[in-house]
Image (cartoon, rainbow, N blue to C red):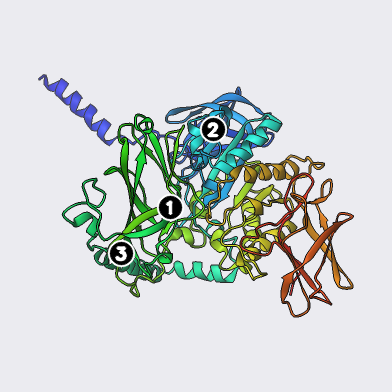
Amino acid sequence: MNFKLSFLITGLLSAALFAPHVTKAQVRLPQLISDGMVLQRETQTHAWGWAQPGEKVAVKFDRHTYKAVTAADGRWLVTLPALKAGGPYSMDISAGNHIVIHDILIGDVWFCSGQSNMVLPMERVKERYPEEIAKADHPQIRNFFISTVSDISKVHDDLPTGKWEAANPKSVLGFGAATFFFAKQLYNKYHVPIGIINSSVGGTPIQAWISEEGIKNISQYADRLTVLKDTAFLNDILRKDAERKKLESKSYKLTDKGLTGPQKWYDTAYIAEGWHNFWLPGYWADQGIRGLNGVVWFRKEIDLPPSMTAKPAKLFMGRIVDADETYVNGKLVGNITYQYPPRRYEVPAGLLKPGKNIIVVRITNTAGKGGFVPDKHYFLTTGDKNIELRGDWQYKVGEVFPAKTAVDNYAWFSAQNEPTGLYNTMVAPALNYAIKGILWYQGEANTAKPDEYQQLLPALITDWRNKWHGSNIPFIYAQLPGFMEVDYSPEESKWAQLREAQLKTLSVTNTAMAVTIDAGEWNDIHPLDKKDVGDRMALAAEKVAYGDTALVSSGPIYHSAKIEGNKIMLTFTDIGSGLVARGGGELSQFAIADETGKYVWANATIKDNKVIVWSDEIERPMYVRYAWADNPEGANLYNKEGLPASPFTTDTR
């Protein structure tokens, strides 16, 4: 090689190697700023993200360009002007790279949060609402589902990976059922795009959704957050968790006779000997197996006509506590690892045969009553023919777990159950996103301490409004429905106390509550009636967020009580066209007490849109309660618009 040429090449390489780095970093957008998003109409909105400090960012939207320079921490933000409902639009973001966001709509955005009943998907209620799903072609109703992530150590910059999805018969199965019905009612009335951001986690307490600033005045949770910031304390908790998991894995590696014997108990060639009778549905603790945590097998032989064997079938096994594996003719047709989902298993064509068929269910349970939840569907169907599965089955114990040790009873640490644990990760990263209002459906996880809820719910409302810089953002919430066994005498109830805390929160401005006391199921903490919940929350939103002040959006709400001799006269707001006893007949679920506080069932009648309550047992009445129970079956005070009255007590001692 020519010396001069070699020297020139070497010099150019050295210059390139040691020149200052001038390549721009790739601009990055938050998960919410993505294809298919819905931006809030008639208010300023934001686009934001991250890039190299000092980098210039240009955002082109609706024929205008908005510019920003990335701050020292790598953040940038531009403010977009208010727009009317419509679309679709595109958005161009240019910096060191170029991003185009497509199919943007302008409409109303609702941030929907809480625990499992807020996120319970349409897939779980598809048998109840098949026509709603089949007709769910609503391209202007869009859902952004936030996956669960929790952290008490810091506020996160962005949400976990997610995407906007338009409602169609396939995608709607992943939409929260209550939120879908809510969005559909609003869309049908106002004909503007509706965006749902669903940020919910099953089984989580309200304190996990409140920020550090928002919870600082509630001492027990502020103190808990302080100790969790102690690294040594937190490490000790995590160490104990690890020890428990290690011991548990050793303890439960025992032998299930149904899987380790000479023949599997689900095998069609297995001969069942020594099995006991069992009536399904029911719990094994009620049918001869006392205090057992472990594995119990159940089997049933059924006879099928040839007409049911040439096509696929579906097996409904209600709900099972806790985990199950279900077999048909020796083949696994499905399994679920926890108690709450309904068991709906597909049986492929050809698996069923004329004559004798065997269904085997292996149940694993580690706490409480194991078995089959009553009052659920248990049948095999081919669509045109059903085989009822309630009735006589057989059972046999396959494995007995050892008695619980001290480590088993230790409360596991979970950031999603701790103060700020979900706010930091599933609320804070969305605060730049403009919203129309907030939907909240939660409370089941706090029923053990209902008195606290009277502090916690208003604290959450204030906190989120402050964080979104909107002191009057509409806040719509669902009151807890009926749940658990029916009490046939007046009793104390923590669920009733929590509903009372929810009722009292109506004193917070620009809030509304959807009463759902009649939308529950005694045996299911996840009741399937999510349409009434969504529709009633939409009614509340129509009044509070959309200004339809003439609308009857709530059932009767207790206002005042006046003692007149041996009777108490109750007045209500939100009576609409008038008070009624739903279904006719007498009012039910009213109880009355004197100064002793001992409640007895009361007579109650409607007169001039007031309710008169009395009992021949109480000469000097002081207090009245209505629907004051975990599950106040038969509560029937409504307005003529068909909306139920909220449970309440006049007892403020």
In the displayed structure, 640 sits above or below 568; it is: above
* Label 1: how many Cα within 10 Å (few below 14, some 14–19, many 20+): few
Q: Where is residue 45 in the image (x, y as percent from the top left)?
A: 62, 37
* Label 3: how many Cα within 10 Å (few below 14, some 14–19, many 20+): some
Number of the label disc, if any, that sits on residue 391: 1
Name the residue tied to disc 2: 133
Q: Where is residue 438 in the image (x, y as percent from the top left)?
A: 63, 47
> Which residue is at the front of the view, 287 or 106?
287
Amino acid under disc 1: Gly
Amino acid under disc 2: Ile
Q: Is residue 646 visible?
A: yes
Q: What element carries label 3?
A: helix
Q: How far apart are marks 1 and 3 (CA)?
A: 39 Å
On screen, residue 263 versus residue 359, left or right, reads left
Question: Mark 1, mark 3: which one is toward the viewer?
Answer: 1
Number of the label disc, if any, that sits on residue 245: 3
> Which residue is at the front of the view, 33 or 165?
165
Q: Which of marks 2 and 1 is nearer the N terminus?
A: 2
**Quadrant the N terminus occupies:** top left
Q: Distance between the residues labelled 2 and 3?
A: 42 Å
Amino acid under disc 3: Lys
User: Which residue occupies 27% across, 36% down?
Assistant: 18
Q: Position of residue 322 (x, y in %)?
A: 40, 57
